[in-house]
Image (cartoon, rainbow, N blue to C red):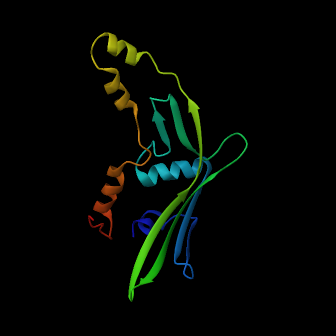
């Protein structure tokens, strides 16, 4: 599965056969750098919302503490109507923090010069934490192919 492919070579990768559970943890600045490398995306931990003038990010280290991002995947088998269903579930636990930002004058200058509407400028500033393209690109190099659903 994709979980094993992404994390199998990591130092804190664990498997519990009794629980059918995989787990991998990343801590501090070193963990943040490693996740950038794994996801092939520098802004995996950051999201900015220009409508509320806030930014949110995954907190891995501050001046007092070190935090972790914990990825877990487990398998469960359900029995219903004499049929068995095997389910996989992935969860990710992490601490977040947020702050406010002030918009720069680029948007105002562009609007005054009629280059772009404010809505177009705002759309260009919005970044997602985990976009699809990097994970889809992994399929090209994987021994395990991901089939479209």
Q: Quadrant of residue 13?
A: bottom right
The residue drawn where x is 56% and y is 78% is: 19
Q: Quadrant of residue 96?
A: top right
Where residue 27 appears, as percent x and y from the top left, is 61, 53
Quarter of the image that includes the N terminus: bottom left
Q: Is residue 41 above or below residue 122?
A: below
The residue drawn where x is 55% and y is 67% is: 23
Residue 25 is left or right of residue 51, and the answer is right
Query: Foreground residue, 88 or 36?
Result: 88
The residue drawn where x is 46% and y is 46% is: 44
Where residue 86 appears, as percent x and y from the top left, is 41, 78
Residue 22 is left or right of residue 6, and the answer is right
Query: Foreground residue, 120 or 26?
Result: 120
Quarter of the image that includes the C terminus: bottom left
Query: Foreground residue, 84 or 41?
Result: 84
The residue drawn where x is 47% and y is 35% is: 48
**Residue placed furthest toward the top:** 112
**Residue placed furthest toward the front:** 81
How many dots with numbers?
0
Q: Is residue 4 above or below residue 107?
A: below
Q: Is residue 107 above or below residue 53?
A: above
Where residue 143 appears, as percent x and y from the top left, is 32, 70
**Residue placed furthest toward the bottom:** 82
Where residue 61 appears, as percent x and y from the top left, is 64, 45
């Amino acid at each position: 599965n994709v979980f094993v492919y992404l994390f199998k070579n990591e130092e804190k990768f664990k498997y519990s056969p009794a629980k059918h559970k995989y787990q991998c943890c990343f801590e501090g600045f070193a963990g943040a750098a490693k996740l950038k490398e794994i996801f092939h995306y520098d802004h995996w931990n950051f999201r900015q919302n220009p409508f509320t003038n806030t930014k949110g990010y995954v907190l891995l280290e501050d001046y007092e503490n070190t935090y972790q991002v914990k990825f877990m995947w487990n398998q469960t088998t359900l029995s219903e109507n004499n049929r068995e269903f095997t389910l996989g579930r992935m969860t990710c636990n992490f601490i977040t923090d947020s702050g406010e930002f002030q918009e720069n004058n680029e948007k105002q200058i562009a609007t005054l010069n009629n280059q772009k509407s404010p809505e177009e400028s705002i759309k260009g500033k919005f970044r997602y934490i985990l976009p699809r393209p990097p994970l889809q690109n992994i399929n090209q190099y994987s021994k395990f192919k991901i089939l479209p659903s």
